Image (cartoon, rainbow, N blue to C red):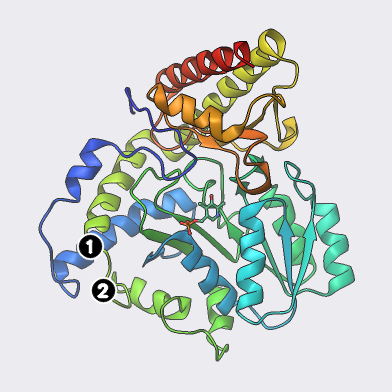
Amino acid sequence: MLDHGTFFLPGPTEVRPEILQQMARPMLPHRSAAFEDIYARCDAGLRPIFRTARPVYIATASATGMMEGAIRCAPGGTVLSLVNGAFSERFAQVALSCGRTVVRDDVPLGSHHTPEQVAALLQSTGACTVTLTHSETSTGALNDIEGIARVVHENGAVILVDSVTGLAGARLEFDAWNLDFAFTGSQKALALPPGLALGVASKQFIHAAAGNSDRGTYFDLVEFEKYAVKNQTPSTPAISLFYALAEQVEFVAVEGIEARWDRHLRMQTMTVAWVARLHGELHPDFSVLAPESARSPTVTCVTLPAALKGSAVAAAVAASGFVIGAGYGPLRETTIRIGHMGDHAEAGLRRCLDTVRSCLEAMLRTT
Ligand SMILES: *Cc1c(COP(=O)(O)O)cnc(C)c1O
């Protein structure tokens, strides 16, 4: 794990130097056995991370590309978008911009949807597709994907899961939870540079998608399936990022995915305890935005006392050598976000949190 990392942004995240070095290797023809070999290593290493026996699609794009691919491959009919923050809202907007009929259900920022709510929404809307985030990076809230997937299937719909800050940090069981599509981006809990979007589709989902006539070209998941089974991509991939990915999935395998989830939970516990001390010792308005029952193990969004501004705190922390996130969207100035994901571990996080606390103390003294 990283010992001296200073980059605790909730994406992109800190990348180990060994991984960066992989990206300096020379090019390969992408239609060659040598590239297929690299793809096969990536796929073999990603399946245990997604907990699936299905092939993993790897697109040269940011994660939003897979969001678009998922929508274009979804069954016709109404899309129910569960919105609890900026990224779940983006999913709803992608569906709208792809011409879908979207029913959007918002819960307050920091909150999440329950399976019971989703069941009622499916019955009232007759939606065929549900979109949501696993870990909502703008608020630190975690959705119960397993429970929601169950009610989605009971109502004959499909579930499309944005697990961009979930996968490789928070438990996700693609096969056991019967998910239809789940995706992530390279630059979050996988701790790689940005540039790759990774997704898995169920057999039934991709089979049904083949009947959609407006799947587009670049993010057509049916094409990705065809090429993935040959260890290839439909068009020229970012080969350097594949070198990095192949190396990183082997690193994840050495730790073990369950141990990786546990490490993220320990970092979350540490961050929550730190916020409790800020609340008790510095100011009663410090709190964790998401409720205790639904917190992401990869990102914590901390509510600030009114005298402090999220962007100013992030700037002061940066001047002290660590990078954290200001709030996001409407929460920009009222919160800060600590990204405790990827290859970070407790010792490095401790140094980051100590530094943030010193900055907060200094700022509270002068306000
Ligand atoms: C970062 C993020 C995205 C967007 O990812 P891009 O790689 O910028 O397209 C989507 N969803 C969530 C939950 C994210 O954290």
Residue highlighted by disc 1: 239
In the image, what residue type sits under mark 2?
Thr
Q: Quadrant of the C terminus?
A: top right
Residue at 28%, 68% (x, y): give it.
237
Tell me if label 1 and label 2 are in contact, CB under 8 Å. Answer: yes
Specify whether residue 53 is in view: no
For marks 1 and 2, give the CA distance.
8 Å
Among the 4 quarters of the image, the one containing residue 294: top right
Considering only vertical position in the picture, is 134 above or below 212? above
The x and y percentages for residue 76 are 68, 83
Residue under the point 40% across and 40% down: 13
Q: Identify the residue under disc 2.
A: 236
- x, y percentage for residue 80? 75, 68
38 or 23: which is nearer to us? Answer: 23
* Rendering quarter of residue 99: bottom right
Residue 300 against residue 36 in the figure, above or below: above
